[in-house]
Image (spheres, rainbow, N blue to C red):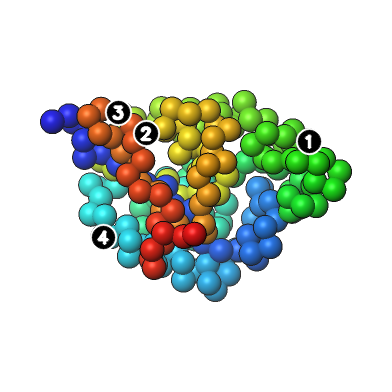
Amino acid sequence: MSALDDARVVLLRHGETSWSTQGRHTGRTDLPLTERGEEQARAAGTLLTALALRAPLVLTSPWQRAVHTATLAGFTDIVVDADLAEWDYGAYEGLTTPQIRESVPDWTIWTGAVPDGETADEVRARTGRMLASVAPVLPDRDIVLVGHGHFSRALIARWAEFDILEGRRFAMSTGALTVLGYEHDARTIHAHNLLSHGASL
């Protein structure tokens, strides 16, 4: 049995905000959770308890929607890590994909440019730093990463040894969990987009 067979990295997307309900790209805008978002965070805490994590190390994005989600999920000892911040949407901050497509047809965050924001290569570098930073901890402790939609999806893709472009394959709801781990030393995805009432459609 490998020392990593029991190791898990759990991603938790922050709870709902007023912009997430509208599909608006929310990067550096520091929005609070809605009342429903707070309920989602508490429900995520119940799921996390059920996972019986091994002395979890909890890292969170610096934005309040992530920090508050971690707190409401029941964590008191958290470490803020700037590398968990959401993709910087630059000039597209606050816009929806249909609004962006009015001037850039077929645009997606995964395939299109982001004026004044982060490039895919910059996000790829951040995911690499994040995964490298948690690797030494995993033999002894599980990791919980509390963050955002697009960056979490990029992390999932990189964990599975895909390019971050394939983050488009892993839709992630607000307040949802994804459980990453190993099987026979190979990185795997144990569960994805878990919510308190079951996987989201």
Q: Which residue is mark 4?
A: 50
Instruction: Name the residue type under label 2.
Output: Val
Q: CA distance from mark 4 to mark 3?
A: 24 Å
Q: Nearer the viewer, mark 3 or mark 1?
A: 3
Looking at the image, residue 149 lies above or below residue 184: below
Q: Earlier in the sequence, mark 1 or mark 4?
A: 4
Q: Nearer the viewer, mark 4 or mark 3?
A: 3
Q: CA distance from mark 1 to mark 4?
A: 42 Å
Q: CA distance from mark 1 to mark 2?
A: 31 Å
Badge number at residue 186: 3
Q: Residues within 10 Å of mark 2 (few under 14, many from 20)?
A: some
Mark 3: secondary structure: strand
Q: CA distance from mark 3 to mark 1?
A: 37 Å
Q: Earlier in the sequence, mark 2 or mark 4?
A: 4
Looking at the image, residue 85 lies above or below residue 19: above
Q: Is residue 178 left or right of residue 92?
A: left
Instruction: Name the residue type under label 4.
Output: Ala
Q: Which residue is mark 2?
A: 134
Instruction: Name the residue type under label 1.
Output: Pro
Q: Earlier in the sequence, mark 4 or mark 3?
A: 4
Q: Are marks 4 and 3 in contact (CB under 8 Å)?
A: no
Mark 2: secondary structure: helix
Q: Residues within 10 Å of mark 4 (few under 14, many from 20)?
A: few
Q: Which residue is mark 1?
A: 115
Q: Residue at x 76, y 45 (%)?
A: 92
Residue 125 versus residue 24: which sits nearer the camera? 24
Q: Earlier in the sequence, mark 1 or mark 2?
A: 1
Residue 136 versus residue 181: which sits nearer the camera? 181
Q: Are marks 3 and 2 in contact (CB under 8 Å)?
A: no
Is residue 183 among what the camera can see?
Answer: yes
Q: Is residue 133 left or right of residue 83?
A: left
Q: Residues within 10 Å of mark 3 (few under 14, many from 20)?
A: few
